Image (cartoon, rainbow, N blue to C red):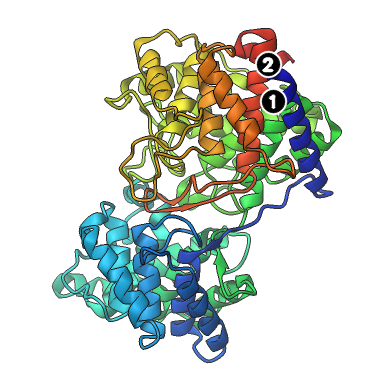
Amino acid sequence: MNSRIEGSVVRAAEALFALQRPDGSWPNRRPTAVLGTAGAVVALHLADPERSRDLVERGVRWLAGAQNADGGWGGVAGAPTQPVPTVVAASALHLLDPQASREPVRRATDLLDRQGGMRAFTDPGMAHMAATFLMLAGLGDIRGARRIPLELLMLPRRFWRARLSFRVAPFVAMAFVQARHSPPKGFQRLLSRPARSAGLRALAEVERGENDRGGYGGDNWLVAVVCIGLCCAGAPDALISEAVGYLRSNVHADGSWHIMQGLDLIGGSYIARGLADAGFAADPRLARARRWLRGCQQDEAFAIFDAPPGGWGWEGPRGWPNILDSANVLSALVAAGREGGGEDGAESLRRGLRWLESRQDRTGSWGTFVPDTTLANDGPCPYVTAQSVEVLLDGGASRQDPGIGKALDWLLAHQRADGTYEALWYRGLTPGTSMALVAFGRTGLAGHPVAVRAREALLDAQLADGSWGPGETGTPGDDASAGTVEETAWALRGLLACGVPADDPRLRRAAGWIVSAQQSDGLWKASPVCMHIRDLAYYVDGLIVNGLALKALGSYRAAAADGPFEKQRAS
């Protein structure tokens, strides 16, 4: 087994270093996105109908060809059907080519009816989004929908930041659409003009923090939603044209749009940590990767999230700073040791660790964008909390540090009844449970009853072939009968961290499964485990899968050779 793992690690490292760019980064294939494409063609149809007619027609053809056999659409072409992409794609087809799309739209609406219709949308924000697209296509009506209180933005932001969090931009856009098609009445009508101005100011502030003009969140789907809202609000032409320009600049030759910019940064941080754990921490090519990651650290505050300088976002040096991506980058940087690659690297690491500490919730957990948010899709998150604990420990924090203690208390108190933990930005129950086990193992809590329950729940979820999938989530698109490299790697590393020995037959089978899943080019195939919209739309990341596989195999190799999981840091 050890020789197989060694050979697998070497082949993967050679393949990844061969792909590395001169600046130290790795290219990441941005998956073509159903939501991005459907949103873009609707936005361009409304905002730029003549000039963008050919792009709209090509996008419609791509959407029709991306429909699944069951009548629905997934987050990306070929992915399992999910409700939000299905509603948005069907609405776009009906709006833009009703005659030719009659049969595809019928199949989609029949599928949605069988799945419970709008009752399948448990997230109120996404339910409103779906209803809005159905209305735009003439397939529904939003006049009876709950009104979006845009006048909330007229208050000081401390009153709405935690409530809206990263959904500020779609909140404003959907309010603009609703005001156009279902105008407010009475006292709310008197506030409509100043509320519209407040909404435009909020969008302008978000846009000022982006890497590219008109690129809200670096996400073509979100840009399309904002563009539609701006059209409905009769916004200044400059704002609309910037969004249109962003969408036009990102269209693919096949007529589709990708999901997000900046996946290079997320995936690159996983690759850098995976290679370090696999024995390449001192390799000069990895030092180049760390320099690139440090160069993406943000040196300006992002006021709308009340985020100080020092964090990272998925887009690069600017964009939306968030805790998940910052923790991923810091995980790669701390793997080089506290010096972080010279004094410049040490200072960057110190700033990043301080930034991470500053974003902890009052309860001890970490979310993703805004501390102490009330938005369920932001936080608190068991996965991010456990990962933050590991990163801070790697960065020199003590188990007795008050922030670490509060985080552990929160994790111990927020286990699901079945012993598992959730992750807000990765599907299913395997990632969160695995990451919690890493935190418990690193802090001497592997024998705690909560950790034991989590370990047993994870072991019980192992599939017959030695792999792991998402677990029994009941979420459409989560295939609990098939394992993935990502989820198997998370599980293997978590079990090793909490004390399951490398010679346990279940772990040997898991490591062997990962090795067997390696492709002839030395890399691993990605699966749709990353969340674009929680539980409603997934995407694949071609770099994350390789970083996770290397982290798991490196941990397994170290545990098999040296014993305890912690010793791998000295290897």
Crowding around mark 2 (Cα neighbors within 10 Å: few <14, some 14 to 19, many 20+) is many
Residue sitting at x 38%, y 81%: 101
**As rendered, which of 163 and 129 lies closer to the eye?**
129
Q: Position of residue 296 (x, y in %)?
A: 69, 46
Of tags 2 and 1, the one toward the viewer is 2
Residue 298 visible: no
Residue 260 higher or lower than 423, as above or below:
below
Residue 354 higher or lower than 177, as above or below:
above
Task: Give the image quarter of residue 96.
Answer: bottom left
Where residue 277 is drawn, which disc sits there? 1
Upstream in the sequence, badge 2 or badge 1?
Answer: 1
What amino acid is labelled 2 in the image?
A: Ala
Q: Are marks 2 and 1 in contact (CB under 8 Å)?
A: yes
Where residue 303 is drawn, which disc sits there? none
Q: Position of residue 320 (x, y in %)?
A: 54, 51
* Numbered disc 2: secondary structure: helix
Q: Position of residue 160 (x, y in %)?
A: 33, 51
Crowding around mark 1 (Cα neighbors within 10 Å: few <14, some 14 to 19, many 20+) is many
Please identify the quadrant where the N terminus is shown. top right
Q: Is residue 21 left or right of residue 69?
A: right
* Numbered disc 1: secondary structure: helix
Label 2, label 1: how far apart the Cα atoms are: 9 Å
Residue sitting at x 56%, y 37%: 485
Residue sitting at x 29%, y 25%: 418
What amino acid is labelled 1 in the image?
A: Asp
Question: Mark 2 sits on what residue?
Answer: 558
Q: Position of residue 50 (x, y in %)?
A: 53, 92
